[in-house]
Image (cartoon, helix red, strand yellow):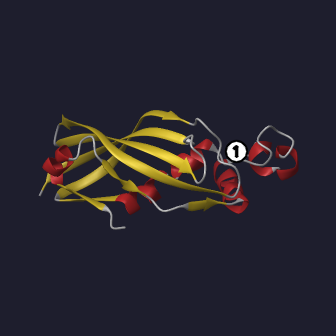
Amino acid sequence: MAPTVIEGIEGAKALVGQELGTSSWYEVTQEKINAFADATGDHNFIHIDEEAAAKTPFGSTIAHGLFTLSLGPMFTYEIMTATNVTFAVNYGYDKVRFPAPVLVNSKVRMRAVLSTVEEVPGGIQAMITQTFEVEGQEKPVCVAEQLVRFFGEV
């Protein structure tokens, strides 16, 4: 599926309240979880020790919540693109929650909704609600309110 095109600042304003799209599925393997643990220094057993994690209520290792959130940029590039702006930057997050774990070997995808747009000096700030889902599971594994600033309409 082609990404949603946000055509400048006025185009962003016109998309408020609309779903921008859904990414493809991405498999979260133990190898990827281990690489994230190495990159961040977070080697909690629940993420990397398969034998010990099997004895927990989860029954297996789980991905770091921040691993899940860090998939957002990759999914965003697949879901949307902006044109007719000088540049856009990730301004941060207002709220992030991890309502359910991502078990090893799960497939994750992200759904994005352009929730709000407000004027800021030189452009706009958009809130994009990112909902991360696991295949075959009703409850989301992460819900995040990302703030993106778009500057200078060309």
74 or 130, which lies in front?
A: 130
- Residue ID at (40%, 62%): 78
x then y, percent, for residue 62: 71, 47
What residue would you read off at disc 1? Answer: 42
Where is residue 4 shown, x and y percent of the image? 29, 59
Q: Position of residue 34 (x, y in %)?
A: 71, 56
Query: Which residue is the extreme one toward the top?
Result: 95
Q: Measured from the top left, where is residue 39 in percent x and y?
A: 64, 54
Left-right relation of 25 to 130: right
- x 64%, y 48%: residue: 40
| SS label for mark 1 | loop
Question: What is the count of numbered marks?
Answer: 1
Q: Residue at x 76, y 41 (%)?
A: 58
- Looking at the image, residue 55 sits to the left or right of residue 26; the answer is right
Label 1 Cα crowd, 10 Å radius (few <14 / some 14-19 / many 20+): few
**Which amino acid is tagged 1?**
Asp
Residue 91 appears left or right of 58: left
Above or below, comparing residue 48 to residue 26 in the picture = above
Q: Which quarter of the figure is the C terminus placed in?
A: bottom left
Quadrant position of residue 56: top right
